[in-house]
Amino acid sequence: MKFTFENLFSNKQNKYLFSAFGILALYGLTNFVTQYRIQRKYDKLCQKRRDELKRSIQEFKQSYDLSTGLSAQLEKEILNYTIADIKKILFEKKVTVKQVLLVFINRTLSVATSENLNLITDINFIEAIQEAEKQDQEIYSDPQIIYQYDLFGIPVSVKDTYIHKGFDNTYGLVSRLYKPATYDGIQVSMIKKARGIIFVRSNLPQLAMTFESTNRIFGRSLNPWNKDRAVGGSSGGEAALQAARCSVIGIGSDIGGSIRIPAAFCGVYGFKPGMSRQTEIGEGVIEKAANGMVNIRPSKGPLGRSVDDLIVMLGVLFNSKNYSELPLPIQDPYWKPQDLNLTQISKKDKLKIGYIEQFNDLLPPNCMKRAVQEACQALISKGHEIVQINLDQELEHELAVAFPRLVAAEGGFKSFGENLKGEKIIEEYELMEAGTKIPLFLQTYILAPLLKILGQKTLYVMSKQTHGLDVYQYLVNSGKQKRMNLQFLQYLKQNQIDAVIVPGFGCPAVKHGASKELPLAALYTWMWNTADLPAGSMPITRVQGGNDLKIEGKERTIDIVYILMNRNMQNAEGLPVNVQVISYPHQEEMVLRVMKEIEGVVKFNEKHPYPY
């Protein structure tokens, strides 16, 4: 029979089928138009917010005399001062609080705005100057007040996520613009109780869940050591502010390395306390499932340029007396602060320190292993015992894969996607999102075997961890996490190990966009979130040429992960290299002691002055 359109419509079923196609086409078109309109609306909001930030900066410059009256040499010295150094020159009346603040405001305006490194999301300069002038009057009446408050006279920066009255906590999401907080959260309140002067807020990634600080509102932050490299994330703007010497001390947050990765990329000091020493409350809350995770929770801690400054800020955040004086509505009924106490851990003269140079699920380049060895040599020179840690292969693997297995368990990136509210996701998440949306059947029986056949061992291992689970399997994996944590701590106890040195990350600071390709490098940080252990990150050295750039046994490989890592190591010379120090739950003080002893020998800041 000859085909004609009459034949097509002569059958009632064909008419229904054609109608169904029409409805689907109409739905697709409607959805496209809706998404287009949402993106246009969001693009306008982003541009509006960027213009407002530029305008507020320009108006501030025109309205205030920003000259400090100090010599150029003294200003340069102040930019490199610790908290203790600044307090000393304030007490000696060599400078005023306002002059110190203006030094850091000028530095921020010079290098941290969108015209340069692009590290900030908002300014609080006017309120900060008013507080500085007030503090100068108090010093005039009683100079001893400088030492009565831990952060008196100290300019402080905070990550965009923190609840700060009058400011958005955007998480890099357009839908959270123009919703300023109506009160100060716990951490901001504690800083103010200690008389810290919060003057700027720092940039972060969209959704605050990757290690490249970029979003559609404020754009991409650049690394002060090398503008072609990422600052890390999610507290990337904060770490870069420290490395660029725009702030004395700041606070970030960390659920998989978000303090320690930026610290490593920017060559500064960062600290993730264990959850037993802090509260979850104080940052803005992203909605629904993303806020419901209980196995792994976000930690809050400082970023700075010395261990002593980390100690000061942790003392502020853990201060039980100041916390008890906060307004009851903002307190956490489930949390009671435990004051920082460094006297107990100082009583033990000789420590036994373990070290791990690499985890076999992702081998690091030689520069990362060299940093571990240099940190160990520093401790040996101080009289401590150093031992290599040899974990059971299964335990080591569990430490590496527990985080993605738990975070991806809800399936399809839903818990984060729902917070986008129609906003287009940044490219850094695209592969991660795609991986979580592959059906379990395809992942298990097609993708994983195919990766194995093609020699992609690294991706083969990890591909089995990033899919949705039912409640039963999620509970099974939660049980694995508990056993893993217990086994690791039992190993340390049985071997009488006080702390452990590990690489700061899987590689030095990545090139822009490489976080999309190398998410597995974060296993060196995320494992200490799943184990819920205190962890500090500190700079040891910088990447050299030659052997430093190599990954042992992976110079020639068909494994795509190592091909990308080798590509990332090209032109990496000069980048900072950090190590991490970890210890037992409730032993933040031990981590700080070990970091302090390493710092005293390595002297990174003296040998490698901060750039820019």
Image: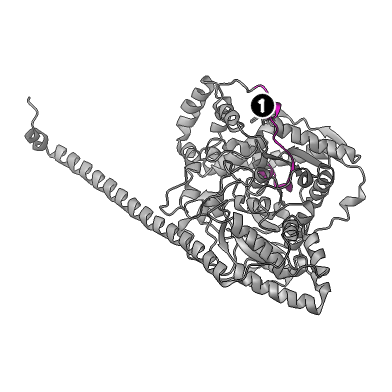
Percent x, y for residue 397? 66, 32
Percent x, y for residue 201? 60, 60
Q: Image quadrant of residue 110? A: bottom right
Would residue 452 appear left or right of 30 to someone viewing this image? right
The stretch drawn in magenta includes residue 548: yes
Q: Give the camera-side residue of 179 and 242.
A: 242
Residue 259 versus residue 442 in the image, above or below: below
Residue 223 versus residue 451 in the image, above or below: below
The stretch drawn in magenta includes residue 49: no
Percent x, y for residue 188? 65, 65
Q: Give the camera-side residue of 28 and 47.
A: 47
Q: Image quadrant of residue 18? A: top left
Magenta span? 528-553
- Mark 1, Cα crowd under 10 Å, few <14 / some 14-19 / many 20+, is some
Q: Secondary structure at mark 1?
A: loop
Identify the residue shown where x is 42% and y is 52%.
423
Q: Is residue 327 visible?
A: no
In this view, the residue farthest toward the bottom is: 141
Question: Which residue type does callout 1 highlight?
Answer: Lys
Identify the residue shown where x is 73% and y is 32%.
369
Q: Where does label 1 land, which residue?
A: 550
